[in-house]
Image: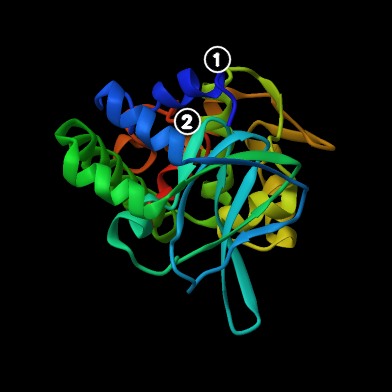
Amino acid sequence: MREEDKPEIRKLLLFRTMSPENFERLMQAAYAHSFPAQLELIRQGEPADFLHIVMEGTVELFSGWRDRETAMAVVRPVSTFILAACIKDAPYLMSARTVEKSRIIMIPSKDLRATFRLDPEFAVSTITELANCYRSVVRHAKGLKLRTSRERVAAYIYRQSSIAGNAVSFVLPMEKRLLASLLGMTPENFSRAIKSLQSDGVAMDGMRIIITNMKLLEAVAGPDALIDGPDTNAGHFGSGLTGP
């Protein structure tokens, strides 16, 4: 792996407070790979052999059952995914594939578990990371169960606007099919929800969202700290789903 990657990885909550010696030992065990778009990196049900760190590109976490498939999260730099399975030494609950060309650092799970037992600060950071993931999963489930599809789309647009500094116009960060799946709906239902929000301050031009009335949008979205987090600027959508 590149030496210049280490400072970026070190900034992550998971690695920030561990001893320099143990961090260097983990990095020596790590592999760096570049992958083309639409390549399956891991498959649900298989052993969790590596913790993955996305350095460049985008990765989709997804699950399937029978003939159905759904997106679970989208991971962007610099982020880890599938920590819980690595620490627990359990099968992956989700599959992962690249959305675009991506460069990923892979740390063997056995080295991760050994460091967990050896370094108290790393152990605390791991528990904190998993706790954050769990709480994010609960928030996501509440949004899916308590909000209608229209409200979920409104809440997503309101949150993205907040992340962009209360911007009244922004480009969707992912294709509509993937976003619809993350929001628990079909692409057709997503399009209908967008159209239904036109009278509540939302317009769409291709991949660009235009907010014409923020107060009307906020009324539909109903931002809630117990669903959306302590504030609406909580990182990329689905970030807390990287733990299972």
Residue picked out by circle 2:
235
Give the camera-side residue of 10 and 223: 10
Residue 127, located in which quarter of the rendered image? top left
Please give the name of the residue rendered at 68% of the width and 60% of the height, measured from the top-left corner: 189
* Image location (x, y in percent) of residue 149: 56, 56
The amino acid on which the numbered mark 2 sits, given as a three-letter code, is Gly
| Numbered disc total | 2
Give the camera-side residue of 161 and 67: 67
Residue 223, located in which quarter of the rendered image? top left
Give the camera-side residue of 144 and 99: 99
The reply, left or right, for residue 171 in relation to residue 91 is right
Query: Which mark is nearer the camera, 2 or 1?
Result: 2
Residue picked out by circle 1:
165
State the quadrant of the N terminus: top right
Q: Disc 2 on helix, strand or loop? A: loop
* Contact, mark 2 vs mark 1 (Cβ under 8 Å): no
Q: CA distance from mark 2 to mark 1?
A: 13 Å
State the quadrant of the C terminus: bottom left
* Image location (x, y in percent) of residue 219: 48, 34
The reply, left or right, for residue 113 in relation to residue 243 is left
How crowded pointer 2 is (Cα within 10 Å; few <14, some 14-19, many 20+) is rated as: few
Residue 13 appears in the figure: no
The reply, left or right, for residue 194 in relation to residue 230 is right
Please give the name of the residue rendered at 43% of the width and 53% of the height, measured from the top-left corner: 82
Q: Disc 1 on helix, strand or loop? A: loop
Whether residue 58 is situated above or below residue 11 in the rendered picture: below
How crowded pointer 1 is (Cα within 10 Å; few <14, some 14-19, many 20+) is rated as: few
Whether residue 244 is situated above or below residue 22 in the rendered picture: below
* Image location (x, y in percent) of residue 179: 65, 49
* Image location (x, y in percent) of residue 86: 36, 56
